[in-house]
Structure formats: structure tokens, C-alpha cells
């Protein structure tokens, strides 16, 4: 289970492994896990809420390009399921 902060819902959401969209290893020990919130927003599994009182403009994980069927993958990237 994951509990990332969703900037669209403005809350931490409890998301299971079925919500995983992408796993990518960037050469570090910890993989980058991207999940799809119930509202449809892509969020990083370790996304934290903004600091209290900060008006920080957050960019959701949607900046991660969607993998098209038959497309190429970066080394160490795994696409999980076809859920949207």
C-alpha cells in the first residue's frame, strides 16, 4: 500500500498496488513508482504534502510521458498494466 499526497484531491490517498502505472529505476537503490489516484492524477509514491503555509506550485507526475503500445522503454523502466 502507498499513501502519496495527491495535489488534485489535496489529500493523502491510500492506494494499493493495483494503482501502479509505472516503475522506473534511475540507477539508485530505490525505484521511482508512479501511481494513478482515484481522481485520475498521476502521483509519485513518495509524494509529500506541501509544507504548511507554502503556496508551492506542484507539478504532478503527469510530466512522466505515457507509454504508447509498441513504444520503446528506457532501460530499467517497467510499465504495469493498462489501467487508465
Image: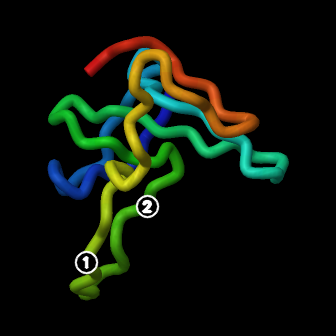
- Can you tell which of label 1 and label 2 is closer to the viewer? 1
User: Which residue, given by chain and number where applicable, does mark 2 sit on?
Assistant: 48
In the image, is residue 69 above or below residue 7? above
Q: Residues within 10 Å of mark 2 (few under 14, many from 20)?
A: some
Spatial CA distance of label 1 from label 2 is 13 Å
- Nearer to us in this view, 16 or 32: 32
Which residue is at 45% across, 12% downward? Answer: 81
Q: Position of residue 38 (x, y in %)?
A: 21, 29
Q: Is residue 15 left or right of residue 72?
A: left
Q: Residue at x 65, y 33 (%)?
A: 77
Image coords of residue 66 (percent x, y): 38, 36
Secondary-structure class at tag 2: loop
Q: How many marks?
A: 2
Q: Which mark is residue 57?
A: 1
Looking at the image, do the residues carrying marks 1 and 2 touch, with CB atoms under 8 Å apart? no
Circle 1 crowding by C-alpha within 10 Å: few under 14, some 14–19, many from 20: few
Residue 32's place in the image compared with 68, above or below, is: below
Residue 47, percent from left and from top: 45, 55
Position above or below: 12 against 84: below
Of callouts 1 and 2, which one flags the residue occurring earlier in the amino acid sequence? Answer: 2
Amino acid at each position: 500500500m502507498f499513501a502519496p499526497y495527491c495535489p488534485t484531491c489535496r489529500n493523502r490517498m491510500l492506494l494499493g498496488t493495483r494503482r501502479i502505472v509505472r516503475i522506473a529505476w534511475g540507477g539508485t537503490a530505490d525505484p521511482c513508482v508512479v501511481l494513478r489516484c482515484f481522481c485520475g492524477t498521476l502521483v509519485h509514491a513518495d509524494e509529500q504534502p506541501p509544507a504548511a503555509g507554502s503556496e508551492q506550485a506542484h507539478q504532478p507526475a503527469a510530466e512522466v510521458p505515457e507509454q504508447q503500445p509498441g513504444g520503446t522503454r528506457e532501460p530499467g523502466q517497467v510499465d504495469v498494466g493498462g489501467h487508465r
